[in-house]
């Protein structure tokens, strides 16, 4: 599904160039469940942004579903991102003035899906995420766990093949975090490729494939037959 070949990305800090990604080579098969761990500044979030087509490499190649994304225009990359990729962020990134239902529906509106087709899709997701009774609530009327479930609903309403989660439990208490992780893992079991960036070893150990990064490089890439660890705050 994904092929990264010698991917590099640098940023200027003052007058010094810092390599956030240093010749990354990575293959990801459809349906995998992967965690990416490492210290702050190791390149985890830069890798996630690259996979999500939110950023472009300085050099190297990123193939997604056989398409060389490094050759796409900005508009083509945005359309490709909308069609294939969903995002879940630590801070939710919900639109404050929109209800839970409207936040989930937003990607369908932006994609030009007619209202009569949007309503049943959103209703099904609200039910799947136990949010039906919160559909008309604004984000500031929801708990952290509910807001993250709304964010997940928005991420999956376009039925993406790839779901990218950046510290998805970072702002949640232990029970809400576990609820969110269980939802993400259920989505993976339904066929969505799931990649989770996390500082939490217990969350990282739940993945069947565990990647560790240091100084912009992948220093470990391990397969595990079963998940391990218990999630905690």
Image (cartoon, helix red, strand yellow):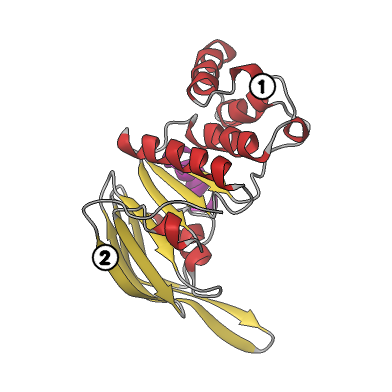
Using the image as rendered, state which of residue 81 and residue 229 is in the foreground.
Answer: 229
Side of 143 where 176 appears, left or right: left
Q: Is residue 82 magenta?
A: yes
Residue located at (33% from left, 54% from top): 228
Question: Residue 37: which quarter of the image?
Answer: bottom left
**Residue 66 vertical placement versus 157 (above, below):** below
Residue located at (46% from left, 71% from top): 38
Residue located at (64% from left, 36% from top): 147
As drawn, which residue projects farthest toward the bottom?
Answer: 15
In what quadrant of the picture does the C terminus appear? bottom right
Using the image as rendered, state which of residue 181 and residue 87 is in the foreground.
Answer: 181
Q: Position of residue 15 (x, y in %)?
A: 66, 89
As drawn, which residue projects farthest toward the left?
Answer: 225
Side of 188 where 132 appears, left or right: right
Mark 2 Cα-neighbour bin, 10 Å: few <14, some 14–19, many ≥20 = few
Q: Position of residue 53 (x, y in %)?
A: 48, 54
**Residue 222 vertical placement versus 181 (above, below):** below
Q: Position of residue 112 (x, y in %)?
A: 56, 25
- Give the SS element for disc 1: helix
Please say whether residue 191 is visible from this viewpoint: no
In the picture of the structure, the residue carrying the numbered disc 2 is: 222
Task: Pick whichever of labels 1 and 2 is earlier in the sequence.
Answer: 1
Q: Main secondary structure of the magenta part?
A: helix
Range of magenta residues? 72-85
- Give the SS element for disc 2: strand
The number of callouts visible is 2
**Residue 50 vertical placement versus 215 (above, below):** above
In the picture of the structure, the residue carrying the numbered disc 1 is: 134
* CA gap, disc 1 and disc 2: 40 Å
């Amino acid at each position: 599904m994904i092929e990264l070949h010698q991917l590099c990305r640098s940023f200027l800090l003052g007058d010094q160039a810092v390599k956030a990604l240093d010749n990354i080579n990575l293959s990801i098969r459809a349906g995998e469940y992967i965690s990416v761990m490492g210290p702050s500044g190791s390149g985890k979030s830069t890798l996630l942004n690259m996979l999500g087509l939110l950023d472009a490499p300085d050099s190297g190649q990123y193939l997604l579903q056989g398409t060389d994304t490094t050759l796409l225009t900005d508009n083509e990359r945005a359309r490709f991102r909308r069609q294939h990729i969903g995002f879940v962020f630590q801070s939710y990134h919900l639109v404050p003035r929109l209800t839970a239902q409207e936040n989930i529906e937003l990607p369908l509106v932006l994609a030009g899906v007619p209202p009569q087709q949007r309503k049943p899709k959103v209703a099904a997701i609200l039910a799947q995420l136990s949010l039906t009774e919160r559909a008309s609530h604004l984000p500031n009327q929801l708990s952290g766990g509910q807001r993250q479930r709304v964010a997940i609903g928005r991420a999956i309403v376009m039925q993406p093949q790839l779901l990218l989660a950046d510290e998805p439990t970072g702002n949640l208490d232990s029970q809400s975090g576990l609820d969110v992780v269980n939802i993400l893992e259920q989505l993976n079991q339904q066929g969505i490729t799931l990649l989770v960036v996390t500082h939490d070893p217990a969350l990282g150990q739940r993945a069947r494939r565990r990647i560790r990064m240091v100084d912009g490089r992948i220093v470990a890439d391990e397969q595990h037959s079963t998940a391990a660890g218990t999630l905690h705050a």
